[in-house]
Amino acid sequence: MEAHPLGLGGLALAAGLIAINAAISIAFRLGLERTLLIASLRMVAQLAAVGVVLKLIFDAQSPWVTLLAGLLMALVAGFEAVSRLERPFATWHAYGLGAGTLLVTGMLGAMYATAGVIGPDPWYQPRVVLPILGMVLGNTLTGISLVLDTITDVASRERAAIEARLALGHTRFMALDEVVRRALKTGLTPILNSMAVAGVVSLPGMMTGQILAGAAPLEAAKYQIMILFVIAGSTALAVTATALGGVLLLTDDRHRLRLDRLLPRKRTSTPNGKKR
Amino acid sequence: MLRVEKLKAGPQPALSFEVADGKCLAVVGPSGAGKTRLLRAIADLDPSGGRVFLDGAERSEVPATQWRAWVRYCAAEPAWWSETPRTGIWFESPHGGVVQAGTRDKLAGDKRLQRLLSSVGLSASHLDRPISALSTGERQRLGIVRALLDDPKVVLFDEPTASLDSANSALIDELVKFLLLAGRTILLVSHDPRQIERLAHARLQLTQVEPLQAPADLGAQS
């Protein structure tokens, strides 16, 4: 078993497949040719750049460079988690909550997996830390987005019931307990689903990659099992922290519901129908 | 004694007034004048300027949950978060276990619940019906029972009889009179002048306040 390095010719051959998309766009007059071209070029440039940057980081073998890269990833993920909310918060606090939660839970998950479970030497080996951090961040980001969306949505719809409880002297956490419960359920659904179907319906990306790179299937499966547990743990921590933090953002210290801290509902798509 | 000092809520200019124990102040005015907002601000459900005192204690010095146990806002249309009123009236204590809203003694709470239910013409069986199977009037009366269960010192009634027929309205009037005799302070928003005459000792008239920014060029051109 060995890896099969990909040549430039092979890449060009794969890129030819984009012609199918172009042909469909032209045949059905979708007008997507330009978008398609830009998306393809962006994808190539971004991944090539990441390849170069990762090589530099791997060569540096410095805990500080690794930490810096991890920080940057968490900040970008935090921004992504909050930027597409249906009803965004009017202040930057939600961004702080998203990025902070991602940073802490992502780092905890990645460190637990590398230093605790895998144990490479040195423990901050960027080749191990960064891909795991990336997977943890990508999954917790989804959970955090779902939690924030659910909390703002349910709190807006159930406003009268929440305020009735507050008026009866309930604390903000009591009055919003149903909101928190629903948000947690929603936030945990994706990871539970992907654990349930892993290997049956879908072959997870990391396992596929390892097998392609020449690893023994059983070895790849063990890694995938480990990473799914780490993701599940990190997601659970992240959605709980976000749900409780979200309650604090939507209420104040006088136990009042503060829906005025939310901006009006965003339109789901731009006028020309493009979605982000 | 409830004392309101320069309370700024909604469109109204800052309001100051006092209501003694056992007295009822009617809050009247056209729709949109800010009657509900005034009651909500006194219960500290919305941020507002000014100060509110109950028996000398200023609301910002009292924990919010304690303040709302003393000063109870009773909405025109009570909202529910449970399948049946009973689970909405009984709730889990923050210290563990299930208790009746605000009462430490479950038995005393039970008796009080029975008395309140019969005083508004309902029975214990109403507590176990699905909320959706109750009429608007039954829900409104259950909302009043829920609000009075832990015996608040001040009750802010927002149109308590809006969905009730005259017989049931009369029951609520009697209940309010009883509360006043027991020394409770009451603010009453009502559109029924006769009800106000029967119950209120004083009136607070809120006037329609003009929007802050009138469309400027309309006036200038004419």
Image: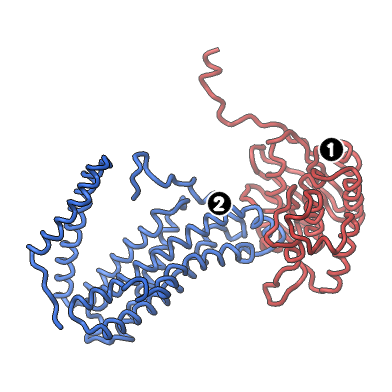
Percent x, y for residue A152?
52, 56
SS for tag 1?
A: loop
Residue type at mark 1 is: Asp
Residue type at mark 2 is: Leu
Percent x, y for residue A111?
33, 80
Colour of chain B, in one word, is red
Q: Chain of mark 2?
A: A
The N terminus of chain A sits in image quarter: bottom left
Residue B62 in view here:
no
Q: Is residue B57 left or right of residue A243?
A: right
Q: Chain of mark 1?
A: B
Residue ID for mark 1: B192
**Is B219 placed above or below A102 here?**
above
The furthest residue to the front:
A27
- Judge if badges 1 and 2 mark residues of a common chain: no
Give the class, few, some or many, for how many residues have Cα within 10 Å of label 1's Cα (few <14, many ≥20).
few
Percent x, y for residue B190?
80, 41
Q: Is residue B8 left or right of residue B140?
A: left
**Is B125 placed above or below A214 here?**
above
In the image, what residue occupies the spot 66% across and 37% down?
B13
**Looking at the image, which is closer to me, A40 or B46?**
A40
**Looking at the image, which is closer to me, B33 or A126?**
A126
Distance between the Cα atoms at labels 1 and 2?
Answer: 32 Å
Residue ID for mark 2: A259
Colour of chain A, in one word, is blue
In the image, what residue occupies the spot 52% across and 14% down?
B221
Q: Is residue B155 left or right of residue B173?
A: left
In the image, what residue occupies the spot 41% across and 57% down?
A82
Quarter of the rendering containing residue B57: bottom right
SS for tag 2?
A: helix
